[in-house]
Amino acid sequence: MLALHRHSAIETVYARVLRQNLQQFTICSTQSDAGNTSLALAVATRAAKAGKRVLLIELNTGKPQLANWLSLTTNEWLPLTGHWEHAAQETDVPGLMVLNCPVQSSHCVEFRDLETLKLFFNSCLNLFDMVICECAPVLTEKSQLQHDNHLPVDIICSASKATLLNIVTGRTTESQVDEARETLKNSGAILAGIIMNDRFAPSLQQELVRETYRFEKRLPKLMQYLRKRFSQMTLLNQEL
């Protein structure tokens, strides 16, 4: 998982974070399975590799993954009264600490109060150079909203200094983006940028190979030759 921080796309996101001087921000998406946790972990790792003290906070009760990925203990904590400083855990990356998603204490009102979360993020910044929060999708399904431990994304984003919206190329619709932006705007959240996530988008090489099958019946030998050539071309195999 941590190798993702070397990807050129993560370098672009991190450079944008630095240009905008984002010291505390939340990464959210329009829908589930958008790679939020991977993205947040990669950016946090990149910052830590640059010598920053980084705290990565997981507030996605619907799909918590960091404890499993990083072999961490599932600690319980609260933003103000739950001694979060003692719940934060070190990782294999020097300078990177993680507050994994609480299970039992996530139903507490502290996670749902705007001013409390603002104070919490400010207290985090007193100890770290960069604080990154990863939360559930903005357009959470109604069935999940009914769960007692669901944490309100709009309040989390509003309490943050800035929000980055992660959308999936080819899967996130324009209407979903508009709805998510409107939700964030109405909550008072500051949308600092939109990340185009190409994790499911086909590469140029894949598109060219796919096109060869259109002419497979008429020119089978030529198409077979072209597919072999495409697979050997260094430029087409580069990740953009």
Image: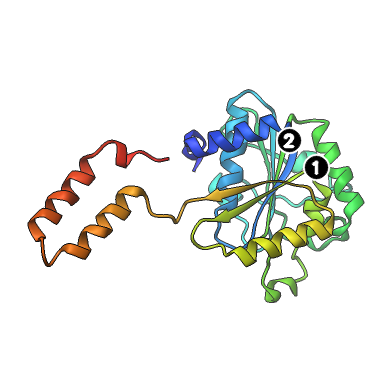
Residue 47 falls in image quadrant: top right
Label 1 packing within 10 angstroms: few (<14), some (14-19), many (20+): some
State how the image is colored.
Answer: rainbow
Mark seen at residue 161? 1
Label 2 packing within 10 angstroms: few (<14), some (14-19), many (20+): some
- Residue occupying the point 60% across, 63% down: 174
237 over 167 or under it: above or below: above
Mark seen at residue 23? none
User: Looking at the figure, which quarter contains the C terminus?
Assistant: top left
Image coordinates of residue 22 in percent, x first then y, are 73, 35
- Residue occupying the point 54% across, 48% down: 69
- Residue occupying the point 21% across, 40% down: 232
80 over 103 or under it: above or below: above
What residue is shown with label 2? 22
Residue 177 or residue 14, whichever sits in front: 177
Left or right: where 80 falls relative to 101: right
Q: Amino acid at mark 2?
A: Leu
Q: Residue furthest left?
A: 221
Can you see residue 91? no
Can you see residue 219? yes
Q: Residue furthest top?
A: 51
Image coordinates of residue 136 in percent, x first then y, are 67, 59
Left or right: where 168 falls relative to 157: left
Residue 128 falls in image quadrant: top right
64 over 55 or under it: above or below: below
SS of the residue at dot 2?
loop
Image coordinates of residue 199 in percent, x first then y, are 47, 52
Pointers 1 and 2 in contact (C-beta within 8 Å): yes
SS of the residue at dot 1?
loop
Q: Amino acid at mark 1?
A: Lys
